[in-house]
Image (cartoon, grey):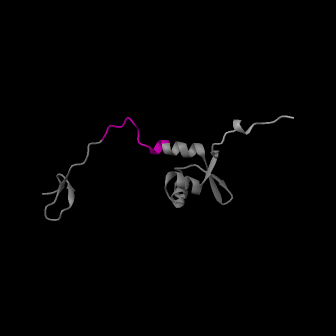
């Protein structure tokens, strides 16, 4: 009789191969409606199973990779603003006369 030790088993959380719309919404910190809109526009590939969608983990990773700004993009210079003394509002320099 073979006995397995529990100490050799991983206690980490198992990551699913596919996500639900709600799970993707939670991962991306957006609403489920926006996830469905991304699917309908074709920006996020999904499998339709009955009336629900399943989004593969690799698709979510690829979407995030496309959405993140490239690291080699030149840094933009900070916007300079001036304070309007009458109203107290900030305006970009060069727009006030």
Q: Is the residue 88 above or below the residue 7 in the image?
A: below
Name the foreground residue: 22 vs 36.
22
Residue 36 placement (x, y as % from top left): 55, 58
Residue 24 placement (x, y as % from top left): 56, 52
What residue is at 52 percent from the left and 50 percent from the top?
Answer: 43
Q: Is residue 2 magenta?
A: no
What residue is at 49 percent from the left and 45 percent from the top?
Answer: 64
Residue 60 placement (x, y as % from top left): 55, 46
Q: Quadrant of the rendered structure where residue 83 is?
A: bottom left
Write down the region rendered in magenta: 65-75
Q: Quadrant of the rendered structure where residue 96 is?
A: bottom left
Specify whether 54 is left or right of 75: right
Q: Is the residue 7 above or below the residue 31 in the image?
A: above
Q: Is residue 71 magenta?
A: yes
Q: Quadrant of the rendered structure where residue 4 is?
A: top right
Chief secondary structure of the magenta portion? loop
What residue is at 53 percent from the left and 51 percent from the top?
Answer: 27
Residue 94 placement (x, y as % from top left): 16, 52
- Residue at the farthest right position: 1
What residue is at 64 percent from the left and 47 percent from the top?
Answer: 16
């Amino acid at each position: 009789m073979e006995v397995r030790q529990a100490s050799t088993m991983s206690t980490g959380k198992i990551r699913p191969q596919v996500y639900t719309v709600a799970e993707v919404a939670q991962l991306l910190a957006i609403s489920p409606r926006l996830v469905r809109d991304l699917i309908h526009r074709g920006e996020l590939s999904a499998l339709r199973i009955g009336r629900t969608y399943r989004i593969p983990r690799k698709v979510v990773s690829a979407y995030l990779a496309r959405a993140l700004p490239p690291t080699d993009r030149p840094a933009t210079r900070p916007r300079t603003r001036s304070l309007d003394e009458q109203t107290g509002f900030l305006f970009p320099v060069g727009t006030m006369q």
